[in-house]
Amino acid sequence: MKNVDDLIDSAAELAERGLSKGEIADELNVSRETASWLVERGGGAESAEAADATASADIHVDWSALGRDSTRLGYAASAMADLLVKQGEEVDLTVGIEKAGAPLATAVADRLDTDLGTYAPAKHQWEEGDIDEHGGGFSRNFAAIRNRDCYVVDDIITSGTTMRESIDAIREQGGEPVACVVLVDKMGYDEIDGVPVYSLVDVVRVDRDE
C-alpha cells in the first residue's frame, strides 16, 4: 500500500466483508482508533467529517513481502527464534497471537522445537467502546498452556494492549510467558508486565519543532 487512500479503500473493503474494526486494525497493522478512522473516512462526507475530529497519528507497517512467501517468512522466523533462544531453559511452548502472529509462531516453534498454541485477542470482536467488555481465548486445536513456560509471538506491537492481554491470559491459565518477539515494535518496549520484548525492527517517531 502506497498511501492513506489505499488504506481507506482497504478498510472499506474489509468492512464490507463483515470484519470488525478490531479485525481491520489487525489486518492493516494499525491501532483500533486508526482502523475506526479509516472505516469512517470510507463512509462518505458525513462520516469523514466525524473521523477527522478524532484523527490521530499512527504508523502503517506492510510486511506482506514476507507474508506472501513461505521462504522469506521462514527467514524472518529464524531471526525471531534467534532472539528468543537464550531466554529460558525449560520453554516447550510457543504461543502465536492470531491472526498474523499464528503463522510466524508456527515457523518459530519449528525452529525452537516447541509445541504450538494460539490466542485470539479480544480486539477481533471490537467495534466501538471499551475493549474490556470483550474476551479472547486459546484455540483448542493447538497445544494447551497447562502451567508451561512459553514464548509469545506476534507480528506488530502498536500500543501494547494485545500483547499485555495475551500475557495476562497465559498467566490466568497458569503459564509463564518467558519472552515476547515481534517483527516490528512501534512503541519500542523493552518489556511488558515484566516480560522481555524483542523485535526485528523498532520504530521511533522523531518530532521536530519547526
Image (tube, rainbow, N blue to C red):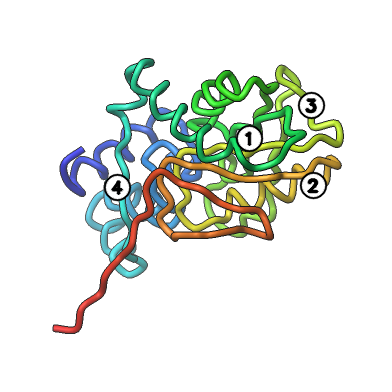
206 in relation to 190, above or below: below
The residue pinned by badge 4 equals: 43
Residue type for callout 4:
Gly
Task: Give the mark nearer the N terminus: 2 vs 3.
Answer: 3
Q: Which residue is mark 2?
A: 171
Mark linked to residue 144: 3
Quadrant containing the N terminus in the rendered view? top left
Q: Quadrant of residue 57?
A: bottom left
Residue 134 at x, y percent in the picture: 68, 47
The mark nearer the N terminus, 2 or 1, is 1
Circle 1 residue: 120
Between tags 2 and 1, which lies in front? Answer: 2
Query: Residue 28: x, y in percent?
Result: 36, 40
Q: CA distance from mark 1 to mark 4?
A: 28 Å
Depth check, front residue: 196 or 12: 196
Q: CA distance from mark 3 to mark 4?
A: 41 Å
